[in-house]
Amino acid sequence: MQFHRFVFALLVCTAPAFAQGQSTLEKIKSSGVIAIGHRESSIPFSYYDDKQQVVGYSQDIALRIVDAVKNELKLPSLQVKLVPVTSQNRIPLVQNSTVDIECGSTTNNLERQKQVAFSNTIFIVRTRLLTRKDSGIKDFPDLAGKNAVVTAGTTSERLLRKLNEEKKLGIKITSAKDHGESFLILESGRAVAFMLDDVLLSGEVAKARKPSDWIVTGTPQSREAYGCSMRKDDKPFKAIVDRTIATLETSGAIEPIYERWFLKPIPPKGLNLNFPLSDELKELFKHPNDKALD
Amino acid sequence: MDLRIFFTPVPTGETTYLGWLLAGLRTTIALSLASWVLALALGTMLGIFRTVPNRPLRAFAGAYVEVFRNVPLLAQLFIWYFVVPEIVPGGHWFKSIDPFVQAFLTSMACLALFTAARVCEQVRAGIEALPRGQKSAGLALGLTLPQTYRFVLLPMAARLIVPPLTSEMVNIFKNSAVCSTIGLLELAAQGRQLVDYTAHAYESFFAVTVLYLLVNAVILVVMRAVESRTRVPGYLGSRK
């Protein structure tokens, strides 16, 4: 009897975590705080610079969204709470209202759309390989029988496992907990290649001790659209977010932001990613949309 | 909560998501038991060192306990995984073997060495809890010091420390979850992977919690039986 009461009390305590009643805008208005989910090492989208400040392309967009929410709710004193998230916990944290919107490097795909809503696409990437220049790895078939690393929870993890299973390549795959650790595993020689979104790989190169040692290679295995993720079925909030991003993209206001992060030296090492605006991305900026690419 | 997710095939098709969790459970059990055997052996030896009348041995075991008990387990794991192979001979070879074997062996060594420090303190406490007269009696009977330990002190101490050793054993199963950070696909990692692939966080963590509880419940039941059979009559907790 006592035990049953205890279990009941426990269930009651956990109930708020499942409560979905309040809309995001109501929550922001009543608390006066908007919680932004950011990444810690997704260069150049969302990461800590040398002063431990959150910076990046997605972070700049997130700040524009905060401004739009401020205007909408007429809350000039709106506080911004920055919550670091990882590839693994970003979706649960959005779902359980720990963060209101997550802007990092999250791929919009159909499976995730069942769990969270995605904003208009902010970037398009391809998944490729990072390897040492002298490793002899040119493309995915070269990985046969070798060790490769992916970051746990990324679409690359899934794609590489699938490719491995289908083509019987016998690649031994390690899943590391974040991009920084994946690169450490690559750098220490535990893996010959690291599969990830091309632009994030360029970001890892920018952080490396000797950037000139590394090269991004291989046939792209997928195209992916990055978007900010929010709770599902919250149309008013998504409308503000989508409008903000669409206006940025169609008005051309996104271009200086793009240049700042992809064509100019960026913190922490002042390295230039030299990642020119692709035709796909130009097309996207003309016609903003929130569609998944695969 | 949608429990059907556990019976859905994984994207690569070779098993279901429940299959992933059970594979993770197997790794967790294998890792924890292997580490536990090593920790028990090493910990017992160090525990004896802590109590023998030999200053260097006592100092060595004392230093071991301080180092391994005072550095966070996660930091120790990263040191074994990322630092040690860079500085010891053969480390380069180790890094080229199957990643699962690498992660498993590193995790096993790390958990065993960490838990050995804790077992050591339990063994020492067990030996020191015995009346001093037992050791004197053993020596007075003409037994050598090793014989006194072997036939008098250790059998008694071992029976006294079954309850704290049980909690160390439960701890090693729980601590093994840390090893998911170096890519070992044990139970916690499979649970995390299930979330990544299906985004069913509640179901996944619920299942992982239940599996850990089950494993530890089995340990508790078994060890309770061991405890009641090995209790020393006349000591604390024994039936009159």
Image (spheres, grey):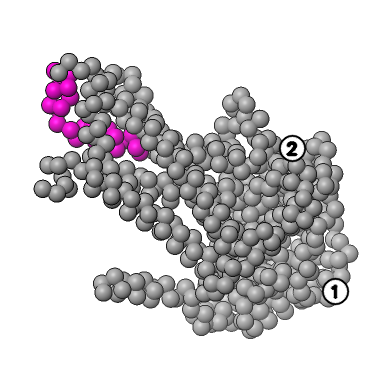
> Which mark is first along the chain, 1 or 2?
2
Kind of residue sitting beneath label 1: Lys
Magenta segment's dominant SS is helix
Q: Is residue A247 rendered magenta in the image?
A: no
Q: Position of residue A7 (x, y in %)?
A: 34, 72
Secondary structure state at the residue bearing disc 1: helix
Magenta segment boundaries in residue numbering:
B117-140
> Label 2 vs label 1: CA separation?
38 Å
- Name the spot of residue A136 as percent of width and height, x first: 83, 38
Q: Is residue A242 visible?
A: yes
A237 is higher (above) or lower (below) than B49? below
Q: Is residue B132 magenta?
A: yes
Up/down of A221 relative to B142, above or below: below
Q: Which picture quadrant has residue B195?
A: bottom right
The residue closer to the viewer here, A226 or B195, is B195
Which residue sits at x=41%, y=58%? B214
Q: Quadrant location of residue B196? A: bottom right
Determine the residue positioned at 82% across, 71% down: A285
**Relative to B230, is A116 on the left or the right?**
right
Q: Residue at x 49, y 60 (%)?
A: B208
Q: In this image, A234 relative to A10: left or right?
A: right
Q: Which mark is residue B75?
A: none
Looking at the image, residue B142 lies above or below residue A89: above
Determine whether the residue tagged by mark 2 lies in a helix, strand or loop.
loop
Do marks 2 and 1 share a chain?
yes
Q: The residue under label 2 is which amino acid type?
A: Lys
Q: Which mark, by number, is residue A286? A: 1
Residue behind mark 2: A210
Q: Is residue A188 visible?
A: no
